[in-house]
Each structure stands twice: as C-alpha cells, then as structure tokens.
C-alpha cells in the first residue's frame, strides 16, 4: 500500500470517505505496529500535552499516511504520534495535523483523521481548540469544557440518510472525569463558524443570542463524525482571546498563538491528567 498522501479537493472528494479511512487506518496500523484506544486532536496551545502522556513509540509526518496533510496553520503540529500511557497502558493516537474547513478541501477531509482513528480502534476522542470567548470573566488562557455546539458552517460530514443522535455529543461521563481533575473548569457551548475571517461583532452577538459562549473554526464537524462512528467525545477549548466586540482590541492570529504559549504548560498538564483517567475497554 502506498503511503503517499491522497489529494482531496472540493471538486474531487474521495468516492468513499469511509473506505479511505479504513485504508488510512491499515497504513497507520502497519507503520505504528498497533491499534489505538484514544484519539487526541491538539489545537492551538495544546501541543505540549503529548509530551506528558507517556512513552512515544511511533511518530511520523502526518502526510505519510494516506489522506492526511501537513498543517496549513501556524501553531499546529504536523505529525501523527502513538503514545503508551504509563499509568494505564492505553495507546493514544495524537492527531497533530488538523485540516480546517476553511482550507477548502471539504468536510470529508476535515474529519478524515477522526474516521481514521475510529477505524484504528479508538473508542474515545478528545478534541481541543483555541477559540474566542464571549464570557468577559473568562480571561485569555482559560480552559473551558464544551458541553454542546452550534454548527454554523452550513456543512456536515454525514453522507446520505445517516441519522445521528447528537443529544449528548460531548459525553457527560468524560466531562465528569474532567471535573474530578479540575472542579473549577467552566462549561460552555461552542459555535463553529466557517472561517478563516474572524467573526464580526454582529456575528458574535448572534452566536450569543443562540446560546454560544465560545466561537471558533473547528471541532463541531469532527464531533459529528466521531458520534457517527460510535466514539465517545470530550471537547475542551482554550480561550485565547475575547471574541470581536467583547474586547476593544483588534484580533490577530499572533494573539492566539501567544495566549497558547502562555497557557501551554498549565493546560497541557490538565489535559494529560484527564487523559490518564480515561478508562479503555480491553
């Protein structure tokens, strides 16, 4: 099997994205020498968590596995990594290369990593991101559990008549584990916009009226695909800035990256402690 990356585009999506994920999982299994239990998607600011989880037993550039791309955004790690958690023996697949919807490759490309992880044995998915916050008391650097989301992209990763119950898309059980690690963690609703433009103040106000506390450009499509695959999902956002209109300061990607760097050690330790407490079926 070739390990060359697949070429995906809005006009030329994979004929069968589920088969593409199975093929990618087979290549991943051959390269890493194992299946996995937990998948971890690292967003802006969260990259250091992988180093705290345990022993890295395999690592490679993401685009050596079919369908994966090198990251298009500064601040994202461009590798896939297999880690053995020392305390539990669980195998964690770290998806450091995230494809965002605004890159223009379509929803199938956005969720290819999630579908590959499910095909590689993962029953739990931990999604992280950097985002804008609507709650003024949540200063940049605040981690927030996602309890629900608003998918405002106008897209879905589901194909055909695939009816997926999203009532508890973000697992209450996993959120309880996170609260046991840090009882002070707040919870909120995350709204995914298309991007790459930051939301306008009017769009932020609209999201707030709809019930959102957090706004960003990832996560919701991945969570939908994970639930379709039967995975249990935990989502954690890092507030990297106040959303447009909440703060008088203009938004910038450098601000997002700096907030991630400043909060990195603390949130990485938090995430590692949560993942270590997730029990996996044997």
Image (cartoon, rainbow, N blue to C red):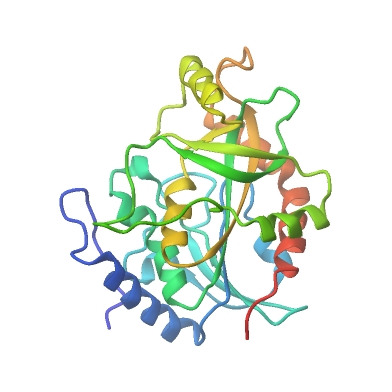
Residue at 46%, 24% (x, y): give it.
199
Q: Where is residue 218 in the image (x, y as percent from the top left)?
A: 47, 44
Position of 173 with respect to 159 (left or right) is: right
> Compared to 122, does 143 lie above or below?
above
Of residue 221 and residue 36, the one placed in the foreground of this image is: 221
Displayed quadrant of residue 8: bottom left
Q: Quadrant of residue 131?
A: top right
Residue at screen point 62% across, 45% down: 147
- Seen from this angle, which residue lies furthest top? 248
Give residue 149's position: percent from left, percent from top.
52, 41
Query: Residue 245, position in %: x, y?
Result: 57, 15
Instruction: Say which residue appears at 78% left-offset and 52% top-offset.
Output: 179
Q: Which of 71 and 228 is in front in this view?
A: 228
Q: Nearer the viewer, residue 204 or 73?
A: 204
* Residue 48, position as x, y percentages in the image: 67, 57
Residue drawn at point x = 57 percent, y = 43 percent: 148
Q: Which of 115 and 99 is in front in this view?
A: 115
Image height of 276 relative to 152, above or below: below
In the visual, does 4 lie left or right of 38?
Answer: left
Q: Which quadrant of the figure contains the N terminus?
A: bottom left
Q: In this view, does 147 lie to the left or right of 142?
A: left
């Amino acid at each position: 099997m070739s390990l060359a990356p697949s070429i995906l585009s809005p006009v030329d999506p994979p004929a069968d994205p589920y088969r593409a994920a199975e093929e990618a999982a087979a290549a991943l299994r051959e390269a890493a020498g194992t299946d996995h239990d937990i998948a971890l998607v690292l967003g802006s600011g969260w990259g250091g968590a992988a180093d705290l989880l345990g022993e890295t037993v395999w690592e490679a550039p993401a685009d050596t596995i079919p369908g994966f791309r090198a990251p298009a955004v500064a601040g994202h790690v461009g590798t896939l990594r297999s880690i053995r958690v020392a305390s539990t023996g669980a195998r964690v697949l770290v998806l450091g290369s995230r494809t965002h919807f605004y890159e223009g490759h379509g929803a199938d490309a956005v969720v290819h990593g999630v579908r590959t992880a499910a095909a590689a044995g993962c029953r739990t998915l931990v999604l992280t991101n950097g985002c804008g916050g609507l709650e003024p008391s949540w200063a940049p650097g605040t981690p927030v559990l996602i309890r629900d989301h608003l998918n405002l992209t106008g897209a879905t990763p589901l194909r055909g008549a695939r009816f997926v119950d999203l009532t508890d898309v973000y697992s209450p059980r996993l959120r309880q584990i996170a609260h046991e690690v840090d009882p002070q963690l707040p919870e909120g609703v995350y709204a995914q916009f298309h991007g790459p433009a930051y939301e306008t103040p009017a769009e932020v106000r609209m999201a707030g009226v709809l019930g959102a506390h957090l706004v960003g450009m990832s996560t919701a499509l991945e969570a939908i695909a994970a639930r379709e695959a039967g995975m249990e999902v935990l989502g954690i956002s890092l507030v990297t800035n106040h959303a447009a209109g909440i703060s008088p300061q203009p938004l910038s990607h450098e601000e997002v990256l700096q907030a991630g760097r400043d909060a990195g050690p603390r949130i990485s330790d938090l995430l590692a402690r949560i993942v270590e407490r997730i029990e996996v079926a044997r």
